[in-house]
Structure formats: structure tokens, C-alpha cells
Amino acid sequence: MMITPAFDLSQDPEYLILSIRVPYTRTSEFDLYIDGTDFKFYAKPYFLRLNLPGRIVEDGREKAKFDIDKGLFTLRVPKETAGEHFEGLQMLTSLLAPKGSRSAKPLVEDLSSGCSGSVGGEEEDDGDDDEEEIDWQVEQEVYKENTEEELRALQKYGFGNQRSGVFARLQEELSDVIDIMNPEGTTAAERRQARLEAEASAFSPDHYLADLFEDDEIQRLLKFRPWWAKLTPSLEQEGEAAVSFTDDEKEQLRKFTNRSYLLDKTSRHQAWLSLVDILLAYSYETRSTEGEHNVESPWTIRKLSGTLCWLETYCSMPEVLVSFGRRVSCYPLYRHFALVSAAVCDTTKILQSGKACVLKCLLDIHKVFRENEPAYILNDLYITDYCIWIQRVKSKKVAAFAAVLQKASLQKKDLELELEELEEAATMVVEEEGEEEAKEQGAFKSTSLSHRDSSDESSDSSSSSSGSSDESEEFEAQGQACTGGGGGGGGGGGEIRKDIPPQLHPTSAVSPIPQEQTSMLISAVSKVEALPSAPQGTRQLIQELGERVAEELQICQDSSCKDERNGSQLSGAGVGKSEATSARSSSGTLLEPSPQRNPLLIVQTQERPDDSDLKRFMSWK
């Protein structure tokens, strides 16, 4: 069995350069065959046959070398016409095709049409789409109802609508690959209606508005530059980019089976539109993952493509763009209209870069689906055929299709999801919330200012109170000093009691006990103590005096109350003048007013045995 070796082709103005990898072969067993566009190479067990896009000659200028360590055979063959550019040297699958297989003529022809088509040796070549310009003005016909048998016959899908009956054998994988439940018995119109209903049901206004107003991540993705944006113009092909393929991609191209596709005008038009739909989904996925595929990549690509997810067939470019825009607004993680516009620009750039760039994108999609268990079916239905078909089309058709996509426009209202109304309503709500928040902040600031003023006033009051306390302490110290002096005058060197509460100094607003009343009370008590010993009479007199003092020494704010208090104290002092003198001399006890706890406090200078009853009576507070 012969093995097709890995190979690569390049060129300069005069030579075609072939690099063929043939490890573990003998240098003496190389065979070459060169004849115009036909090239053959044999080195057991390898065999390579190429159908070249230009003619080469064997005139003695050819050179060959073999690197034994790498197993690489390099051959330089001169071109028949120096300076000629060979197009499509990267399309390895098409180069492997046998000579004469490029024709798109059907293998089975209808002979009933007679010989009119081949008169004079000229044949109609309607299947050669490489020479036919694309007519974007598709003829429209009035819908006509078909019979049930005709409908069953029309249920086709896949590349060029050439496949049918595939999902009848794959019922278990059906739900993991496509969203339509019965592709074999559903018409194209029914698929589209079901797709539109599913999209309308899946659309989430909350998700869309969240991505609209919280778009930091979206803006970061919009700044990303995919690999096709970094391509440089090709020096060999004007208007196309220089695209290089990896070894894995080249190996995949060699594995593809070369085939021809019999597509009529409508099928070719639908194939181009479906290609744009698939590239749009691929562009979005590449940007959303910043060029690094993940486990969600197969789902994202197939979900955003109506072709892959609903087996959709499109008739015009606006239909493709509307379908893609609706699906981006309904399904992926990032649902923003700016990403739709970015994907359209990316796809335009891919088409403008030439069919080599398109092929590289398709190979990347093929790899993503190949590594996912259920999605590989989509490779068999679409991607593999596109990888083979795109290698055969003319570069000018790819450029023409890129121009059509570039001229197409898409607006939010075209999606029929009421995005503009939704955004307008959300903007109004945001503005109203902003105004309310501003009002709340203003009210909060005014409240804070009022609280600050109140706290300032409170602090002023506290400082005033502390000042009053300090003055009270000073007044108390002065009173204690005076009391100590009085005790000394009575004989005996008096001692102040520890349980006497501190005295409050009179403030400007309230005066607890005037100083003149205090001196009068002290003199009256001294006279009572100076009287002869009479325990019962003294006890009664002092009780009477205490009641009068408690009644009269009230703190009054008005002047009338103050005058009454002064008169009462003076009369009380006159009545008990003789008794106070007796009490002073006999007991040696001083009565001192206290505005905080009790009007009468006792300061004892010397304890006398005969006045024990009087002391017990006067010790109450």
C-alpha cells in the first residue's frame, strides 16, 4: 500500500520548490516524473502525484537534495515561463486531484436532450462555477403549495442541500447537535418559523440590558485583535494576505478526499451565504475567547450559526445578518450589538484576505468540531465539504463576495426584538434613579449639617456644665474652709465628716443658698447650743428650726420668692436668738446647709457625753 507523504510547495520567479518528507527511505530509490502540470514522485513506500496550477519543465536546471537526518527531500524545478505566478499552491487537497478531475460535469448525463448541446464540438459548461460571475439578484417566485410526496423529497440539508436521511440514523445525537427535532420531515419554511419562535422565547431583556450598561468586559473584547487582523499583504498575490498553515493543518488537508460538487445556481448562492453565516459565528467565538478556544467553543459556533443549528438556507445577505444578530442577542454569554458589528467587520476582513484565509478559518472550525463528540457530525455535513470546495473557487469571487458583505448594513430595528425601545425605556429609568439619588444625597447632606449644629450646641452646653462643676467644687472648698474655722472658734479643733457631699457653686441662672442666709443660720444655731442643758427642749427647738429652714431655703428664680425667703429667715433667727446661744455653748455642734442632699448637715467638733441623744437625732441626712 502506497503512502502519501507530507509535502509543501513554494515558488520564486523562476523555480517551483517542492519539499517532500520521506523518512526511512533509500536515496537510490527516488523516481521523478515531470510533464507540464503533471508531477509524480516515488520513493518506496511513498507515492505523490500532483496536478500543478502551472507548467514546469525538465531541462537540466532542476536541483534536488536529501537531508537524511530530517528525511526531507527538496526539489527545485524551473518554470516553463519565467516570472509566472502559480496560484493556489497552499490548496493541497486540490493539488492531489488526478488530472482531468477538475471538471464539474456530471458523471451521469441526460441523453434525452439530444445532441444540440455538443454541435461543433462545443459543450455547455453550466457546472463550471469558476467562470461564472455571481448574480446577487436572485429571481423571486410566488409560493406554490407542493404535494406531500414532493415535500418529502425536498427535505434536504448540508452543504449545497445535498444530504438527507443523516439524522434518521443518529437520533441519540440529534438534540446535542441541532435544535430542530425532525429535520427529515420539516420544510425550510417550517424550520425558519420554528427558529424565529425559539429566538423570541430565548431573548432575555434583563441579560441584554445588563451587558448594555455594564460593558467593561465588552469594551475589552472589542479592543482584541484576532490573528487575521495581523496578516500582511501577500507579495505573490495582489489583494490577498500572506497566510501560512501549520503542520497539523497541512496534514488535515492531505487527509481530505478530493471531490467535485454539482451545484446549480441557487445552490451555489446558498452555499456562499451559509459560508458567511458560519464565518460570522466563528469570528464572534474567536473574539469572545480572545483567540483561545475552550470547552464552550463548539457550542458557541454552532449555536450562533443558523446554518449549523437549524439547517437554515438563506436567500440574501440581509437574512444572514439578521439571523446572526438575533442569535447573538439571545444565546451567548456576551449579548451586545457592538459585538455583532465587530463580527461583521472581522468576516469582511477574512474574505478580503483571500481564500487561503477562509480555508484556515474552516480548518480551525473543523478541528474544534473534531475534538467534540457530537459536533463532529457537522464536519461531515458542512465543514469538510467547505474546506474542499473553497480551494477550487476563484480568488476574484471571494473578493466580490467580501465587497457585498462590506456594503450590507444591519440595524437594531432589523432584529425585530424591540431593542431600541427597550434601551430608551431603560435609559429613562436610569436617569430618574440618578435624579432621585441626587435628591437623597442633598437631603442627607442637609441632615448631616443640622446634626452637626446640634452636636456643636451640645458640646457648648457640656463645656458650660463642666465650668459650673468646677465653680461648684471651688465653692465647696471655700465652705469647708469656713466651717473648719468656725469649729476652731468653738474650742476643740474641729474635723470635717467624710460623708459630706460636694457643694455646688451657684450659677447665673439658679442660686442654691445665699451667703447671708447661711451666716444667719450658723449664728442662730450657735445661740441654741449656748443655752443651758435641756435635752427635751433643745431637741424640739432644733426640729422646729430644721423644718423652717427646709421650708424657707428654696431655690427661686424670681425676686419675690427671694424676698419672702429672706424675711422668713430673719424672723426665725430673731425668735431663737437666746436658745441658739445656749445650744452653742452646751453642745458645740454646727449646723451647715447642703443644697444637694439635705438642708441640715452636722459638723461635730467635740463629742460630749451628755449630748448623745441630740447627736443621734441630728445625724439624719
Image (spheres, rainbow, N blue to C red):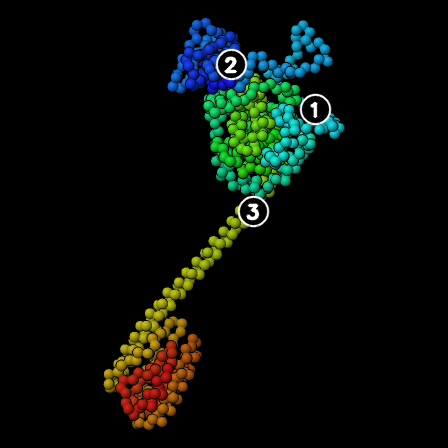
Residue linked to disc 3:
432
Q: Quadrant of residue 392?
A: top right
**Residue 410 x/y as whole percent:** 60, 30
- N-term mark: 1 or 2: 2
- SS at badge 1: loop
Q: Is residue 208 in sight in this rendering?
A: yes
Q: Is residue 281 visible?
A: no
The residue nearer to you, when weighing 601 against 58, is 58
Q: How many marks?
A: 3
On the image, the x and y values in percent for residue 473 come to 32, 72
For residue 140, the mark is 1
What percent of the width, then of the height, locates residue 41?
A: 48, 13
Of callouts 1 and 3, which one flags the residue occurring earlier in the amino acid sequence? 1
Q: Nearer the viewer, residue 174 or 274?
A: 174
- Mark 2 secondary-structure assignment: strand
> Hey, what amino acid is under mark 1?
Gln
Q: Residues within 10 Å of mark 2 (few under 14, many from 20)?
A: some
The label on residue 49 is 2
Q: Within 10 Å of the Cα at label 1, are there few (<14), some (14-19), or many (20+) other Cα atoms?
A: few
Q: Tell me the CA gap for discs 1 and 3.
A: 50 Å
The amino acid beneath tag 3 is Glu
